Every structure is written in structure tokens, then in C-alpha cells.
Amino acid sequence: MIKKPIVSRSPDVMGGTAVFHGTRIPVQTLFDHLEAGETIDDFLDGFPSVTREHVIAFLQEAKDRVIEAAS
């Protein structure tokens, strides 16, 4: 099974900022919205080029990395 990229980084896209793959939306923007008390649905409403699958896969990957780092 080929795993689709969740996040990408290229000097040609947003100056190399980590973005949701296939978009120009920085992943930091998701964190900013969540920290401000907004929901994932609020974020998705504002950034329709990001899919729910993008967000869930990103959060799952982040969770897995935190758990792995703590082990």
C-alpha cells in the first residue's frame, strides 16, 4: 500500500513552510485555529482546499510521533 503524503515542504510553496500536501495551507494554521478554541469544522470551512482526511491523518501522525517520543 502506498502511503499518501500528508504534509509537504518545498522552497517554491510558501517559502518552504510545511503545508498540507497539495495545498498552500500551512499546518501551523490548523494549530493556530485549534489553540484559539475553533473546531476542525471551523478550520475546514475557512480552508476548503484541506480535506477532513488531511486533518485527521495529520493529527494521527502527530499523536503517533508524540507517543513514540515519550516511549
Image (cartoon, rainbow, N blue to C red):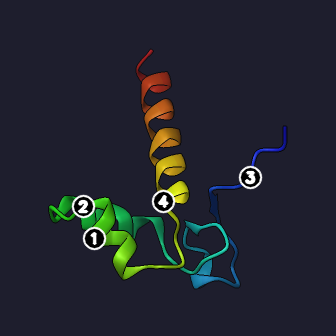
Residue at (67% x, 73% y) in the render: 22
Query: How many neighbours does mark 4 have within 10 angstroms: few (below 14), some (14-19), or many (20 or more)?
Result: some
Looking at the image, the residue that sits furthest to the top is 71
Measured as percent of width and height from the top left, residue 59 is found at 44, 46
CA distance for labels 4 and 1: 11 Å
Q: Which mark is drawn over residue 52? A: 4
What separation in Å lies between label 4 and label 3 (alpha carbons)?
14 Å
Asked which secondary structure carries label 1, the reply is helix
* Mark 3 or mark 2: whose residue is earlier in sequence: 3
Judge from the rendering whether residue 44 lies leftward or rightward of residue 38; answer left or right.
Answer: right
Q: Earlier in the sequence, mark 3 or mark 1?
A: 3
Provide the residue designation for mark 2. 39
- Name the amino acid type tagged 1: Asp
Q: How far apart are marks 1 and 2 (CA)?
A: 5 Å
Residue at x 50%, y 77% (from the top left corner)? 25
Residue found at the far right of this picture: 1
User: Pointers 2 and 4 in contact (CB under 8 A)?
Assistant: no
* Residue beneath disc 3: 4
Give the mark nearest the N terminus, 2 or 4.
2
Alpha-carbon span between mark 3 and mark 2: 24 Å
Corner quadrant of residue 17: bottom right
